[in-house]
């Protein structure tokens, strides 16, 4: 299967949703950082990492990329 076989409207819609979730999580992380709210920052950092992992897992399952290992 080629990359052009994988990328279709359904793929793009799901990927857009994953990007939007990552962006929203990052926005929350940014606000917590700017506010100096450590408790929310830690929680938002975890949420952002999970959003990135979901996106990379999806791309990996589709064979688009091999995600790098994320270490914490």
Image: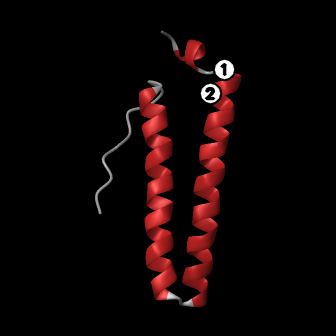
Q: Residue 7: horizontal and vertical position, in percent?
A: 61, 21
| Label at residue 36 | none
User: Secondary structure beneath disc 2?
Assistant: helix
The residue tagged 1 is 8
Q: CA distance from mark 2 to mark 1?
A: 5 Å
Q: Residue at x 66, y 20 (%)?
A: 8
Q: Residue 6: horizontal and vertical position, in percent?
A: 56, 18
**Quarter of image, res 27:** bottom right
List the single residue furthest toward the top: 1
Foreground of the two, 66 or 17? 17
Q: Residue 38: horizontal and vertical position, in percent?
A: 46, 87
Residue 55 placement, left or right of 30: left
Which quarter of the figure is the C terminus placed in? bottom left
Q: Residue at x 58, y 12 (%)?
A: 5
Where 45 sits versus 39, above or below?
above
List the single residue furthest toward the bottom: 36
| Label at residue 11 | 2
Q: Residue at x 51, y 53 (%)?
A: 51
User: Secondary structure beneath disc 1?
Assistant: loop
Numbered disc total: 2
Q: Bin the neighbour count of mark 1 within 10 Å (Cα to Cα): few under 14, some 14-19, many 20 and up.
A: few
Instruction: Tell me if label 2 and label 1 are in contact, CB under 8 Å.
Output: yes
Q: Residue at x 62, y 27 (%)?
A: 11
């Amino acid at each position: 299967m080629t990359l052009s076989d994988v990328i279709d409207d359904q793929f793009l819609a799901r990927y857009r949703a994953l990007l939007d979730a990552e962006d929203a999580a990052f926005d929350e992380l940014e606000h917590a950082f700017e506010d100096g709210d450590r408790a929310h920052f830690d929680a938002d950092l975890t949420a952002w990492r999970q959003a990135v992992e979901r996106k990379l897992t999806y791309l990996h399952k589709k064979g688009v990329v091999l995600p790098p290992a994320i270490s914490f």
